[in-house]
Amino acid sequence: MSETLIEARGLSAGYGKMAVVREVDIRVDAGEVVALIGANGAGKTTTLLTLAGELPPMAGEVSFLGEPTRAPMHVRCQKGLGYVTEGRSVIMDMSVADNLKLAAVPPDVAFDYFPALETIMGRPAGLCSGGEQQMLSLARALGRNPKVLLADELSLGLAPIIVANLLMAVRAAANERGVGVLLVEQHVRQALKIADRVHVMERGRIVLSGTANEVVGQLDKIESAYLAGGT
């Protein structure tokens, strides 16, 4: 049986006094990719922020590496949490090389994930394409050898071939290093190609869960009912 790395039980969370997610149960085991899908505003990012320690739970419990925790995000990151936010997680006025240096990621490690970074090491991140910025973001996160990776909309605004490369790197980290990945992804069909399990979220609640194969078989129905036709 695989080790559970991060888990929420009965989780409710939100902003101020308003709960955005309610009674969510979700877990990520070592070496698996779990996709969390749903329409915009369903509560996916709020779930990630609460698992990361950026938002406190209103109810329920979060466990990280087998222990209940209410530690802030920076403490969880020190213990092996990686988080790629919806916006590009890079410092725009620093070069690609300096972004990697700041994250303590050796260049050769970054190149193993994304060889295209090697030719732009001297370029300011702000002058890189969106795809290059996201490759840098993901290289910075994976290059620090996280135990758990939370990734929010890696593919936002990117071409399908770039999305495929990003998701392949995520899958490789799970397969080769046992990283547990929770992936929020707008490219649902691409995400299902690399996911082991899937949760569908609607209005702050998980309304459907299953293996990727089970969900693929119902995808047209799921898109119609929960994703407003978006993929």
Image: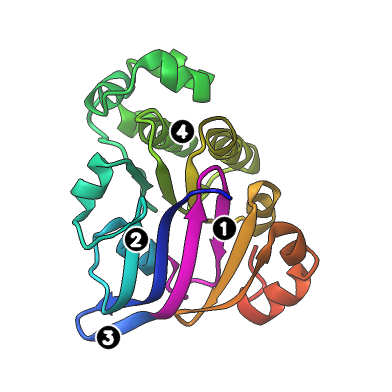
Which residue carries the number 3 mark? Answer: 18
Residue type at the position of mark 2: Ser
Highlighted magenta segment, given as a residue range: 22-44
Mark 2 or mark 3, which is nearer to you?
2
Does 79 sit left or right of 155 as displayed? Answer: left
Q: Position of residue 110 (x, y in %)?
A: 43, 22
Q: Earlier in the sequence, mark 1 or mark 2?
A: 1
Q: Earlier in the sequence, mark 4 or mark 1?
A: 1
Q: Residue at x 70, y 78 (%)?
A: 224
Calculate the distance from the C-alpha at mark 2 to the C-alpha at mark 3: 23 Å
Q: Position of residue 162 (x, y in %)?
A: 58, 37
Please rate how many residues cluster around mark 4, counting C-alpha atoms within 10 Å: few if below 14, some from 14 to 19, many from 20: many
- Compared to residue 205, the image places residue 77 above or below, namely above
Which residue carries the number 4 mark? Answer: 135
Residue type at the position of mark 1: Ala
Mark 1 or mark 2, which is nearer to you?
2
Residue type at the position of mark 4: Met
Contact between labelled residues 3 and 4, with CB atoms less than 8 Å apart: no
Contact between labelled residues 3 and 2, with CB atoms less than 8 Å apart: no
Which residue carries the number 2 mark? Answer: 63
Which residue carries the number 1 mark? Answer: 35
- Locate residue 207: give its quadrant: bottom right
- Compared to residue 231, the image places residue 5 above or below, namely above
